[in-house]
Image (spheres, rainbow, N blue to C red):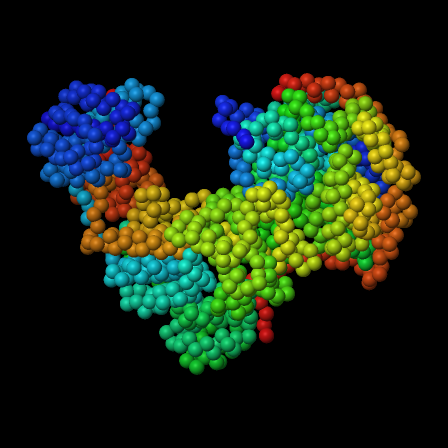
Amino acid sequence: MKKLTYYPGCSSHGTSEEFDKTVKMVMTSLDVQMEEIPDWNCCGATSAHTLSESLAYALPLRNLVLAEKLDNKTIAIPCASCYQRLKVTKYHMDNNPELALRINTTIVGEGTYTGKVEVKSMLQYCYEEIGLEAIMARVTKPLSGMKLACYYGCLLTRPKAITQFDSPEYPISMDRIVEALGAQATEFDYKTECCGASFSISNTEVVIGLSGKILEMAKESGADAIVVACPLCQSNLDMRQPDIEKHFGKQYHLPVFYFTQLMALAFGADPKELMFNKHIVPVEEALAKIGKVEPGPEKIKKPKKALEAESEVE
Amino acid sequence: MITLGLEEKNEILSEVNRRSGANVLECYQCGKCVSTCPVSNYMDYPPRETMQMIKLGLKNELLMANSSWFCLTCSACSGRCPREIDIPAVMEAIRHIAIEENYINDSKKVKEIRKFHEIFLDMVKRYGRNYELRMMAEFNIRTRNLFKDMHLAPKALLKGKIPLGVKPMKSAKAIQRMYKLAEKLDKKHL
Amino acid sequence: MARVGVFVCFCGANIADYVDVPMVVEETKKIREVKFAIEYKYMCSDPGQQLIREAIVQHRLTSIVVAACSPRMHEKTFRKALSDAGMNPYLLEVANIREHSSWVHQKDKKAATEKAADLVRMAVAKSIANEQLFEISVPVTKRALVIGGGIAGIQAALDIADARIPVVLVEKSPSIGGKMAQLDETFPTLDCSQCILTPKMVDVASHPYIELIPYSEVIELEGFVGNYKARIKKKASYVNFATCTGCGACWQKCPVKVPNEYNMGIDKRKAIYTPFPQAVPNKPVIDAAYCTMLLKGKCGICAKVCQVGAIDFKMQEEIIEREIGAVVVATGYDLWDPKPYEEYGVGRFKDIITSLEFERMVSANGPTNGLPVRPSDGKIPKNVVFIKCIGSRDEAKGIEYCSKICCMYTTKHTILLHHKVHDSHAYVFYMDIRAAGKGYEEFVKKAQVDTAATYLRGRVSKIYKKEDKLIVRGEDSQIGQVVEVVADLVVLATAVIPPKDNPELARMLGISYDKYGYLSEAHPKLRPVETAKAGIFLAGCTQAPKDIPDTVAQASACAAKVCGLFAGDTMKKDPMISTVNTEFCSGCQNCVQVCPYGAIVTEEVPMGHGSKEMRTVARINEGVCQGCGSCVAVCRSMAISLAGFTDHQIINEIVSI
């Protein structure tokens, strides 16, 4: 049995309850035991580093220090924004011991940072530590027939030097996971364009413009739905979708799933358990596509053969 | 018209470089950042122009501009910069200097963005965690925009999208102490 | 007793502004052995030299010190002045009071003056122990080796051969011609590459003084300037070139199709092939990686159709040797693989091609009948976006430097596109237009006006697909707006990079290379053709990116250098070399280890007079020794002495201050 340390993040008790719930379901199915960081606090998100350098590091540092008290190698974080704040903080603490000492004084009495715990996004954990084969082995209800645009957003793979995961321009890890679930990932060129993120409330017009373009390109790619690994992306693309449609005078009808919702579904969970009722854009039409083609998980695509190998004999 | 050659030293250049760890002088104005940036068309000075203005030492214009407030820190620009300049860190440095030296951009948007971040941090200070509904409500009250997103509210509430309650963390006091200490650190390391 | 003459130069204002030259002269006059000292504005000028010549005779001087610029600059000039006055030229010492004092201590004239006086004092002390030395003569093998048969190697080989010096030209591929043979028209005059190159290729093949060795590689070089021996590996071609008539029956019948390198993989060639119809030599080779006869023992159709029985499946590679006196390295360049540009979808979008692929398409002898086409659907493109600096000036993804040729060939490509597809439109994303060269700026201006190509100043940030179009997004920084161009085809001007085996080649030849893998010249300005190793020269892009005119000029310069080297029957060489006093040599061979030129060998000498027992000692090959002094420094028994820099001379210098 695998074990990990779990940092749910504030939205797990709010807008992204379904992410939190399905992460737990999926991890149980995959025989992974999760230990939540006791008494964790908010990572500070965009606001902390916007206004204060020290606070931007202090809030995540406390969580890292608390996580070090548990006996697991890795913290896995569902929310992309939380993940990035913890990962960036870890990077700077590991590379700048003087800064680490200084910031550590703000959490006096709670422990000293050593850097022994690895920080990964839940997507990265699934892709790297669980692996496609183990995921495929758990599939009982393949999602064959579904065409999905995998949207990664800005924070899961950037900055490359810090995240050290997948490609910052054309990542494929989530595509491979949904393929392992039996669905088809579309060729989607807006995988890592920003959705407007933290401007959701304070600068909605920006979000409408940016998320609108993402929906447009996802539709263009032929997808029935979008898959995400970030609560902010989910709410911008889902909750704002009616506004976006109104603003541009277009119809997208693209439900926005968390990848763990789809994993749970393919693992045979009762759809009623997956909180699809929380979605603003109805999911029924997209889910009805399942099974419309011959079932059976698609094989993982092999890399294209090199040009040199492409000889042929008449 | 801008007159150059009157200042003895380019203070903003050295200060931005020091805080960001980047070297703005490396910028060769290719503009890849501008067409990468998702919000460059909202900025008074998109990243490429901001870099040039730092080189010219136009401190007042830079600190008054909305650019650093609009930066989403999505890191797309720095990921594509051929000279690997940490542009979000440069934007952040400008923003921090503007806060510390009390340069206030009066536009509605910047005020709202700033207000949002302040309310967010307030919320975290009070509860240790974020309290989404309350934050939205407070934002609307404090920006005198009571009915913003109200059309979403019934649907969102009905669907449990935005919860009414929050589980505050046990040791919220530890966070309040952290805030005080962090504020001191920020001042000490100006 | 020694009688030293000292001549201190003002170097115009270069020295005089920061060093009190008359004061240095006064200080110098206090030295007992100095019998004559004088200052002059320009010592290197003819009146300056005349001062030296006259003083030597009038004051019966036994050694000369010139305090001026670096000896690298004018040591030879002053040595000649000594010779002219009948004095051994090696009795000269140069005190470098410019680079070592005036230029580096411009803020403190007093200290600079004191330092200059010290430098002169040291030179005087050293010169007192100077001995007469005589140039060394080394025999020369008057044959040149040229490595690489592109335009650089071809030009160098022809120029050397035209001087009736035999040349061995080694080319690793089946034909000479290099990258230039893949080009269509060439900037800035738009003359057809084939028309100007193929006659030269034929000249190489028919020249009585050129031995062309194609499909071969130089694998070892030993010896020293004028006396090298090269080992050359002839790869197995499986075709007997002596009997093959080049009729083409074999490759017409061969059933195996392979991506065609000459056409950048756009079409296919056969497993037995000549790279292109104008190949020199025009004889096919069998590609062992694909030939089913060689791989599986089945087929053999080529052998059946060959009427002269030239196919030999049992052929083995062969090592041959050539004695040569000089080497010209002309291994050319490669093009950078743009895969790291993930934001452009390189590798995902078929309609993004490289400039050389575009060049092949628009070439008269190309795979698409001279027309640009979209690889995705074979349609003729209307809107073509050219993006410059792909990998160049991009330290994040590629290399820091400017590849120098892309601005010009992209300009040429806009013209070729305009000629071939009349209703097309070219968009060029650029950062700068670098058109420094004869007729270049005029060429760019004419192209911009004639083709009405749209130039957008900015780096492209993203390319994405919409239906069957590519959307190219970048900033036009001149209007400060983000621009999206709806394109049918995108052409990437990929960076010039050195051949990947350059470092290995450099190690084999004993020359140096830079951090990118370009071979290093001896001096970036004053010795741009020579390497640090005597007798090895560089031509073309193997040294740095350059265009055809510059490449040809450098190749001809190499030829001049080779001809100069071979001008006499023997070569003159500076006598500043090491010698071993075998009586003191302990045979430890530390010197053999440290010698960077491989100039030290060992030999057996009798233990004592008439003794039959032998012992090992070091011996220095005077032809190879460059006088660097490394051996002197490591010799524990002080058995090695460097002429012109003896221990006596060095100690004199040290005790003088």
Q: Residue at x 87, y 49 (%)?
A: A282
The answer to whether residue C618 is seen in the rendering is yes
Residue C602 percent coordinates (x, y): 28, 45
Relative vertical location of residue C513 with respect to residue B25 in this rendering, above or below: below
Q: Which part of the image, by quadrant, shows the N terminus of chain C?
A: top left
The picture places residue A7, in percent across and down from the top left corner, at 78, 34
Can you see residue C88? no
Q: In this view, does C246 lie above or below C577?
A: below
Q: In which quarter of the image is the C terminus of chain C?
A: top left
Q: Nearer the viewer, residue C600 or C203?
A: C203
- The residue sitting at 68% across, 38% down in the picture is B42
Judging depth in this view, the residue of C317 and A313 nearest the camera is: A313
Q: Seen in the image, is C29 located left or right of residue C450? A: left
Please tell me which residue is depicted at 85% across the width and 47% down the height of the picture: A281
Q: Say if A196 sits above or below A64 in the image.
A: below
* Side of C55 where C272 appears, left or right: right
Foreground residue, C312 or C459?
A: C459
Residue lying at the far front of the rendered structure: B1
In the rendered image, residue C183, in percent from the top left (x then y), is placed at 46, 62
